[in-house]
C-alpha cells in the first residue's frame, strides 16, 4: 500500500526591502546638492530572487533641494507579493557648518 502526500506551498508573505537613507550637504553657494545612493535590496522567505523597481523619476546624480525627498521603491517576488519602501534623501545647508 502506498500513500501519496501532496503539498502546496502558498507564498503570501511580501518581500522585505532594505534601504539606506542619504544625508548630504548643499554645494557651496547653492541651495541644492547632487546625490547618489545604492539601489535597495530585497529578500523573501520563499523566493531567492526578488525584483526591485524604482517608482519615482529621480536619477543617480540628480540635484535635490534643501529638505527631505522621498525616492520610492517596490519589490515583487515570484508569487506576485509586493512591498514598498522609501529611501530618504536629506539635504542640509552647507553654510550652517561654517564659522
Image: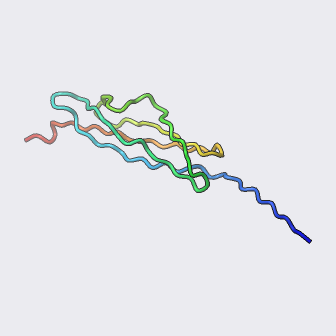
Name the spot of residue 39 as percent of width and height, x first: 41, 41
Q: For residue 23, what is the image quadrant?
A: top left
User: Looking at the image, which residue sits at the far bottom?
Assistant: 1
| Residue 7 place in picture, x, y as percent | 77, 59
Left or right: where 25 falls relative to 88: left
The reply, left or right, for residue 4 in relation to residue 97 is: right
**Residue furthest out toward the front:** 1
* Residue 12 point in image, percent of width and height: 66, 51
Instruction: Tell me residue 24's x, y (percent).
Output: 26, 40
Q: Residue at x 56, y 48 (%)?
A: 49
Vertical relation: 70 (above or below) 4: above
Q: Is residue 35 above or below residue 11?
A: above
User: In percent of the image, x 60 and y 51: which residue is there?
Assistant: 47
* Quadrant (top left/top right/bottom left/bottom right) for the N terminus: bottom right
Q: Nearer the viewer, residue 6 or 14?
A: 6
Residue furthest to the left? 99
Q: Residue at x 45, y 41 (%)?
A: 86
Compared with residue 76, is residue 7 higher up or lower down, i.e. above or below?
A: below
Q: Is residue 63 above or below residue 9?
A: above
Toward the viewer: 40 or 72? 40
The C terminus, quarter of image: top left
| Image side of residue 3 versus residue 22, left or right | right
Figure label count: 0
What is the basis of the colouring in this image?
rainbow
Amino acid at each position: 500500500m502506498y500513500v501519496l502526500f501532496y503539498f502546496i506551498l502558498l507564498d503570501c508573505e511580501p518581500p522585505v526591502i532594505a534601504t539606506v537613507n542619504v544625508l548630504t550637504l548643499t554645494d557651496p553657494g547653492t541651495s541644492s546638492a547632487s546625490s547618489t545612493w545604492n539601489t535597495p535590496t530585497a529578500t523573501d522567505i520563499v523566493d531567492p530572487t526578488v525584483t526591485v523597481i524604482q517608482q519615482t523619476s529621480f536619477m543617480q546624480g540628480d540635484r535635490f533641494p534643501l529638505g527631505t525627498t522621498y525616492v520610492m521603491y517596490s519589490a515583487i517576488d515570484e508569487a506576485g507579493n509586493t512591498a514598498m519602501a522609501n529611501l530618504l534623501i536629506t539635504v542640509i545647508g552647507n553654510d550652517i557648518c561654517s564659522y
